[in-house]
Image (cartoon, helix red, strand yellow):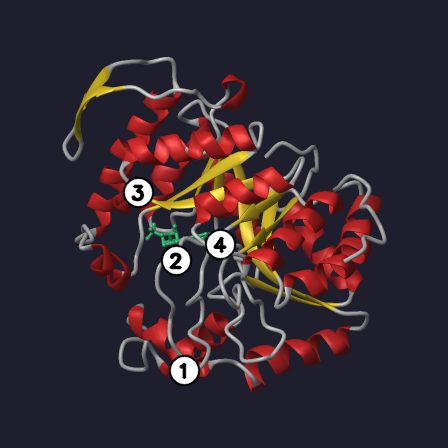
Amino acid sequence: MHGANALQIGLFGANCSSGRAVTLVAERWSGNWPDNKKLAVLADDAGIDFLLPIGRWKGYGGDTDYQGTTLETITWATGLLAATRRITVFGTVHAPIFNPVVAAKEMVTADHVGAGRFGLNIVVGWNEGEFDMFGVAQRDHEDRYAYAQEWLDVIKMIWSDREDFDFDGNYLHMKGIKGKPKPYGGARPVIMNAGASPTGQAFAVKNCDAFFLQASRTSLEETAQRVRKAKEAARAQGRDIGCYTVGVVTCRPTRRQAEDYFHHCIVERADWNAVDSILAMKDISPHTVPLEEFLKQRSGYAQGMGGLAIVGDPDHVAAQLADLSKAGLTGIAISLVNYLDELPYFVDEVCGRLARMGLRAKARAGIPV
Ligand SMILES: Cc1cc2nc3c(=O)[nH]c(=O)nc-3n(C[C@H](O)[C@H](O)[C@H](O)COP(=O)(O)O)c2cc1C
């Protein structure tokens, strides 16, 4: 991303209804355009580094049809880039369902609207039901990344100085390819990926600038090891990558208030029917995993389909984020139950503390909502 913050912070999932909190509470995130636009302007003014959307085409059902209403991410990013000045905005693109020539053109358009602030999150997809809707057969896992490699190669070629080239791969056979304009300012958009399997990770390390990995919930040293391993793998290919992770933040003036709110949203008022539908898609049930593991996964999915739960007062939240930086992470994409209501407090109190620790530029206090 473009900012100079040692620990970068982004907002994850705001293009989807309910964001990443599988909850029934009335204040859950709308995901509508007016709220997204207000949030982007607020985040931009507050010095937040990036906005990362989720590429989702179908909701998960349950009582809220969790993530059932979503804004398409490249068009969402384009609108937000027009409304902001400095923040990086990603589009999350499913390689198998976007023709690469169309995708390259859409992304370059977004990049020009944002004067170089568009980023690509390339995903290969995992949800069969979504693919059925497109009439596209999902490939087996290894093939998905082999296809994504060709897809990205074509896109990078279109964005480079090459003109009128043919591409004859195992999957893509294309002739006389050209695409203008080139990305804004002569540098291609930043590319990220969050592959978790060995194949997915190898793809990310080979192709991406930013790699999202899972931080350990129990050991900072384990997180540090994961970061070191990814960076070393990139260095072995002569590349330098930034490592990021995902978190779900509940920050309130006292630890007790934060824990109570977290419990209220994500336990008492969780949309358990939606959680169970997500688990079923991933084939996680008491029949496939031990009961204890199933219950752990169930509560993990309710609080944002995974990611570190960071719950506490501003001192605690800032200390946890600082620890992630110590583990070598470049940044974190966080979600909040209601992004607009909760961001000003997070920026004033948590980003303020991180600034005093030297991890971020001075936060802009007192942002009007
Ligand atoms: C930060 C982050 C964002 C992701 N965004 C999406 C997304 O929008 N759509 C999607 O289908 N998968 C998304 N994924 C899933 C990953 O791209 C990837 O498929 C998943 O981590 C499993 O890894 P694997 O593909 O190597 O098996 C995301 C994962 C993370 C951690």
Q: Between residue 9 and residue 55, name the one nearer to us.
A: 55
Of labels 2 and 4, the one closer to you? 2
Eyeballing the image, is 140 above or below 70?
above
Give the quarter of the image for residue 253: bottom right
- Give the residue number, with chain letter if any, for mark 1: 273
Please name the amino acid that badge 2 sits on.
Answer: Arg
Quarter holding the C terminus is bottom right
The N terminus, quarter of image? top right
In this rendered view, identify the residue nearer to me: 233 or 172. Answer: 172
Q: Earlier in the sequence, mark 1 or mark 4?
A: 4
What residue is rendered at 53% in x and 58% in y? 216
Q: Residues within 10 Å of mark 4 (few under 14, many from 20)?
A: some
**Label 2: which residue?**
56
How crowded is the residue under tag 3: few (<14 C-alpha within 10 Å), some, or many (20+)? many
- Element assignment for label 4: loop
Which comes before the other along the chain, label 2 or label 3? Answer: 2
Q: Report, in whole angstroms, how far the alpha carbon at label 3 lies from the one at label 4.
A: 22 Å
Judged by depth in the image, the label closer to the viewer, 1 or 4, is: 1
